[in-house]
Amino acid sequence: MELKAKLIQLLPLQSGEGKNGPWKKQDIIVETESQYPKKVCISIWGDKIDANKLQIGNQLNISFDIESREFNGRWYTDVKAWKIDTADNSNAKSEKDPGTPEEDVLLPSSENDDLPF
């Protein structure tokens, strides 16, 4: 899934030692852009944490997965980001230079065309 949202808060960086070695996790709060904005807490794990992109006020494009699990009869839902880009960078790559005219592509005509026009 993907989400475009504005970063409004960084929660404290968490780290620890697990059976597979050291880990770190950064939770962020983002606000969606819609008529009725929603706030969402998203977790970023390990090497996907990029302090340069995680600046308050940045517009982010976030690719994420949602997972729920049961513990002691209660359900918990995690939103885990697996890719984060700043919206400014992704837009700059996809936009064409407005001063450059687009070329028209002409397809070769076929002599066996049966169309009457």
Image: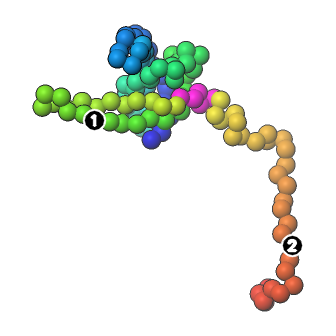
Picture quadrant of residue 67? top left
With respect to residue 32, does 100 lie above or below?
Answer: below
Q: CA distance from mark 2 to mark 1?
A: 55 Å
Q: Position of residue 104 (x, y in %)?
A: 84, 59
Residue labelled with disc 2: 108
Tag on residue 111?
A: none
In the figure, residue 103 lies in which quadrant? bottom right
Q: Which residue is mark 1?
A: 68
Q: Residues within 10 Å of mark 1 (few under 14, many from 20)?
A: few
Identify the secondary structure beneath mark 1.
strand
Residue 28 x, y percent position in the rendering: 42, 20
Q: Amino acid at mark 1?
A: Ser
Mark 2 vs mark 1: give the one in front. 1
Percent from the top left, x then y, of residue 45?
A: 44, 22
Position of residue 36 relative to residue 113, above or below, is: above
Other residues around mark 2 within 10 Å, as few (<14) / some (14–19) / many (≥20): few
Residue drawn at x 24%, y 30% is 76
45 sits to left or right of 117 = left
Q: Is residue 57 visible?
A: no
Q: Quadrant of the C terminus?
A: bottom right
Q: Is residue 18 above or below residue 97?
A: above
Query: SS of the residue at dot 2?
Result: loop
Name which quarter of the figure residue 9 lies in. Answer: top left
Q: Nearer the viewer, residue 84 or 35?
A: 84
Viewer-closest of 82 and 17: 17
Q: Earlier in the sequence, mark 2 or mark 1?
A: 1
For the point 36% across and 36% down, which residue is it?
66
Residue type at tag 2: Pro
**Horizontal relation, residue 39 to residue 86: left or right:** left
**Range shown magenta:** 84-88
